[in-house]
Structures are given as structure tokens and as C-alpha cells.
Image: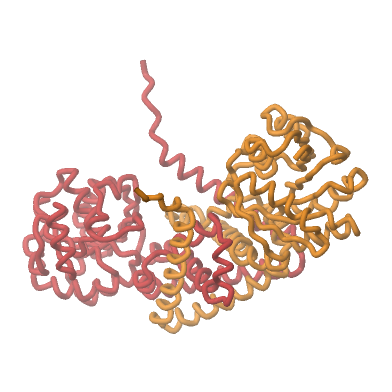
Chain colours: A red, B orange
């Protein structure tokens, strides 16, 4: 493509830029960031060719919003005056129903030009310096198209992510939000809750002193940005509440088994979990294994 | 010491043997295992000098029980007829109040010879082949002495663990069980519960397909042995129930904040957790850092 504009030149947006440049799939990239320092740093690092404002959207083939989901509406409203009819806008938000609602409110009928999506990739670092060209290689990009999106618009977005090495998946926004409430948003809430619970006990120092590697891994996601996860939790709260209620019902059942001394009941739950996790890990490893070599003579 | 007998020649017992041999701190080691194959393998690998039965305890300086905690009572009853008055027995169980109760029941007044303990170390593999000589280097060994234990008996146990490279900590059995209910047993139960919850949903395959690295780390401990964790959960259920109740109260409060749209409340919990975890990680890293070099000229 000729021109790409990226709002938010941190890890996610910057890595998209680097991946496309490495693939030779884009000619000119403009970075827009509420932090002038970040935008300048992205230019210095060669992630983007220039820094600009919302008006840079003019003439773009593709616009990526790689900003916190709560900023989707305001940014779309700011770029709308400069949005050409041939330009496609996409995003990288961790929630989709709220992003779609914000896009409909901001863009009206022109929401047909907005193709929502979510790359399933991340690192523990952030900012332009964290951006790398292979962040998306072998990772999933979930596109959640709207009924209004012409197929060519969806293709432009998925082609770009495919050029970055991503594997394209397709869900509806609602399906997406239920899936990620279950396997991502709920685990984050649970990890934050456990660390906060322990930190608030009078003997917290003693407890942390004996926490070991199992605790470190279990709570790694509680090291994530509280602002970002507040936004995700609020944006997806309907689906997250449903998952939390199911989990609390499960804990209530385990509590009853424990109180009743029902070791066989506990072991059934633990064993089912261990088996399911092992099957999942094996499926991941099979998917990540290199394809069999051609052994034809 | 002259003679050591180890019940259970797997990862924990075998690594204790290897650590002591490497330190030159023991002359002769006998391995006792309910699996004859494991005992023979431990001999082949040079972990122990010979395999034997409970009668091997005769003349031992130290006996280590490195078996599931539920076996503590039966093993102590089996070795009691061969227990010399100068022999000290210790264990490596993950729970302590139940072990102490079993020891009192099995040994009566001779419980003075039993010094309970818990090395805080592990790996994801098990059996004699998993045993390594540096498993305990820099790790904690928590000794939980009884009022009846003579100081010299406690010293014999802690000296042996120190020879394996462990750092000695001291708690009462009750303190130990509360601490580990909080930072180890509850997280295991929570991780098992989450994976089981997801695995039982009709669309489990779809959900697991989108689980990523955060989920993998959060649930790593759900890959642990269900039998072992059933035993630990049951053995420590009073303390575990108290921790589970506190955690469920915390989830109930978070649920109310989420339902009320209280983003600031959520962020306060998430932020407190992130800070507490960061402080904990920094404290670990400081403790693990090499001592400052002497820069005197």
C-alpha cells in the first residue's frame, strides 16, 4: 500500500509498522501520538517516516488505531473530517463490542469503512522502543467484520496483518468478547484480586517472603497496566460478569467439597483441569512445530 | 554424617541425596521406595548406595521422608521398631500440622526425634531421573520444630539442608500452613478451578484456541499432580478454607464494582496489586543478585 497512518506508536502500532516495512508492504507511514516525545522517538527509530496529526489521514490507504480502547470514539471523531472515501480504518483493541458502538456513534453511515480487529500478541514492555518487526509472526489476528464492511475492505486489513506474519481468524464482535472474557479478561481480574488480597493482609511481608515460582507465574499478568485493564474490564463488563459468576459458582462448589472432606471430588476437578491443560499445550506445540519436510526422493 | 535413609527417591529425596553427596556430607545412603523400579533406578544413578526396607533405619543418623504427606503416619509406624534413640527423622511435606499430628500418633513420646520441615523447591519433572545436586541451592528450607525437639536434633536437620545450599527459615507448623495456604495452596486451587471451568463449557475448544501466553502462565500450576494437590488441599483444609473465603469476599467486592461501573474502584485494586507485585519481584531480584564486589584498590 502507499500510505499508512498509525494512531499510537507504541508496542502494538510500532510493531505493525515495522512488520509491514520489513515485508516491503508499505511505502509511507505517518505516526500520530498524543505524546509528542513518543511520536518523535518513532521517527528517530525509523518506525514511521513522519509524525503528524489527524489531518494526516488524508489520502491514506489504511489507518490503524493502536490506542487504549476508550480513545476510539474521540480519535474517530477527530479524523472523520479528513477521511477519504477510499480509506479503510481498523483498530487493535482488546475488546470489540464497545469499539464497534463507539465507531457507529462517531462515523455514522461511514462505519462501513471501519473494520474492527484484535492482534493476539504482546510483550511486557511498551512504547516505541519496544516495537519489533516480528511481534506478529505466527500470532493470531482476529478480524471481527461488520455487516456493512465490503469484502475488499476486510481483505485490505487482513492482507496487512498477514504481511506481518499473522494468522487470520474471524469472529463476530460478540463472540470475540465472550471468548476473551473467558481466557484473558477473567484471569487478569483473578490475578489482580489475589495479589491485592495478600497485599492487604497485616502479615503481607511474611507471605510474600515465601511466595515461589508457581506464585510468580500465576500472578505475572497482575504486572500489567492497571489503566489498560480497568478500561478492558469496563468495556467488556457484561461478558466479564458472566464469566466471573460462572467461576464463583465453581469456587463455591469446590469450597463445599473441601469443607465436606470430599477428596475424590477435588481430585476429579484437579484431574480434569490437568488433562485439559495438557491437551491444550500439546495442541499449541503441534501447531507451532515446523511443517514436516518434503522427503520425496 | 555416617548413614542417611531416604523414603521416596524421587525429585525431592533424590536431590537431597545428591546435594549431600556433592557436599561430602554423608558416607552411606539407603533408599526406600514403594516402587522397586524407582529404588533400583536410584541405585543405578548413584543417588543412593543401596535399596532397602524400613529396617534399614537401624543405625541411621538421619532419616528423610520425601513421600506424599498422607503416607507419613504409615511410614513412621513401619520404621518405629528399627528406630535407634540417636536417630533423627525429618520430612519434606508441603503441609505441616497434619504431618505433626500423624507423627505424634505414630511415634508417641518418641516424637521428640521427629523434626518436621519443608524445602521450598521443585521442578515440573519427577522420579529419580529428575533429581539434581543443586535443586536446593539458594532455596528456602522451612524447619517447623516441635517443643519436644532438642536443639541438637533441629541442628542436625538444618545442617544437612544447609549443606545442600538451602537457606534456613523457622516457622511454627501452624504459621507454615497459613502462609502456604495463602501463597501456594490457594493459587493451585484457583488455577485448577479456572481450567476445569473452561474445559466444561460446550465451546471449550473455541476458548482454548484463543488462550495465549498470559493464560499459559496463569494456569501452569494446574499442570501439577492432581493426587498430590488433593492430599495437600485435604491436609491443609482449615487454613485453605479461610484463605478461599477471604478471596471469594474479595471477588464479591470486585464483582459489585464491575456491575456498578466503578472504574476507579477497579483501578485502585489493580494498581495496588501491580505495585505490590513489583515490590515483591524487586525484593526477590535484590536477594538473588550477586553480592557487591570488593572494589578496594
Residue for point 80% across, 60% down: B100
Q: Is residue B253 above or below residue A171?
A: below
Residue A208 percent coordinates (x, y):
54, 65
Residue A130 in view: yes
Residue A282 percent coordinates (x, y):
51, 43
Q: Which residue in the rendered view is the most extreme toward the top?
A: A297
Query: Residue B49 versus residue A106: which sits nearer the camera?
Result: B49
**Residue A9: quarter of image:** bottom left
Number of residue marks? 0
Q: Which residue in the rendered view is the most extreme toward the front?
A: B297
User: Does residue A127 appear to the left or right of B286 in the view shown?
Assistant: left
Quadrant assignment for the C terminus of chain A: top left
Residue B250 percent coordinates (x, y):
55, 77
Residue for point 72% across, 61% down: B144
Query: Residue B111 versus residue B131: which sits nearer the camera?
Result: B111
User: Does residue B32 appear to the left or right of A185 in the view shown?
Assistant: right
**Residue A258: quarter of image:** bottom right
User: Does residue B212 appear to the left or right of B79 in the view shown?
Assistant: left
Query: Residue B122 versus residue B191: which sits nearer the camera?
Result: B122
Residue for point 59% across, 73% down: A203
**Residue A51: quarter of image:** bottom left
Residue B258 percent coordinates (x, y):
45, 79
Residue A181 in view: no
Amino acid at each position: 500500500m502507499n500510505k499508512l497512518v498509525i494512531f499510537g506508536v507504541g508496542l502494538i502500532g510500532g510493531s505493525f509498522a515495522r512488520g509491514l516495512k520489513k515485508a516491503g508492504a508499505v511505502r509511507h507511514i505517518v505516526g500520530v501520538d498524543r505524546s509528542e516525545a513518543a511520536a518523535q522517538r518513532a521517527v528517530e527509530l525509523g518506525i514511521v517516516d513522519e509524525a503528524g496529526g489527524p489531518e494526516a489521514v488524508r489520502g491514506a490507504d489504511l489507518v490503524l488505531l493502536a490506542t487504549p480502547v476508550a480513545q476510539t470514539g474521540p480519535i474517530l471523531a477527530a479524523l472523520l473530517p479528513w477521511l477519504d472515501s477510499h480509506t479503510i480504518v481498523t483498530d487493535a483493541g482488546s475488546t470489540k463490542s464497545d469499539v464497534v458502538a463507539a465507531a457507529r456513534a462517531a462515523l455514522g453511515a461511514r462505519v462501513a469503512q471501519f473494520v474492527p480487529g484484535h492482534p493476539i500478541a504482546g510483550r511486557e514492555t511498551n512504547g516505541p522502543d519496544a516495537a519489533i518487526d516480528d511481534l506478529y509472526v505466527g500470532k493470531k489476528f482476529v478480524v471481527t467484520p461488520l455487516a456493512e464492511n465490503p469484502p475488499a475492505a476486510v481483505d485490505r486489513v487482513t492482507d496487512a496483518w498477514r504481511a506481518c506474519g499473522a494468522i487470520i481468524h474471524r469472529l463476530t464482535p460478540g463472540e470475540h468478547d465472550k471468548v476473551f472474557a473467558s481466557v484473558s479478561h477473567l484471569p487478569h481480574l483473578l490475578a489482580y484480586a489475589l495479589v491485592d488480597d495478600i497485599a492487604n493482609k497485616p502479615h503481607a511481608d511474611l507471605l510474600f517472603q515465601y511466595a515461589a515460582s508457581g506464585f510468580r507465574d500465576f500472578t505475572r499478568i497482575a504486572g500489567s497496566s492497571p489503566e489498560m485493564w480497568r478500561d478492558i474490564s469496563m468495556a467488556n463488563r457484561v461478558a466479564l460478569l458472566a464469566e466471573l459468576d460462572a467461576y464463583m459458582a465453581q469456587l463455591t462448589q469446590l469450597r463445599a467439597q473441601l469443607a465436606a472432606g470430599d477428596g475424590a471430588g477435588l481430585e476429579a476437578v484437579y484431574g480434569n483441569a490437568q488433562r485439559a491443560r495438557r491437551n491444550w499445550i500439546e495442541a499449541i506445540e503441534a501447531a507451532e512445530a515446523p511443517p514436516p519436510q518434503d522427503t520425496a526422493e
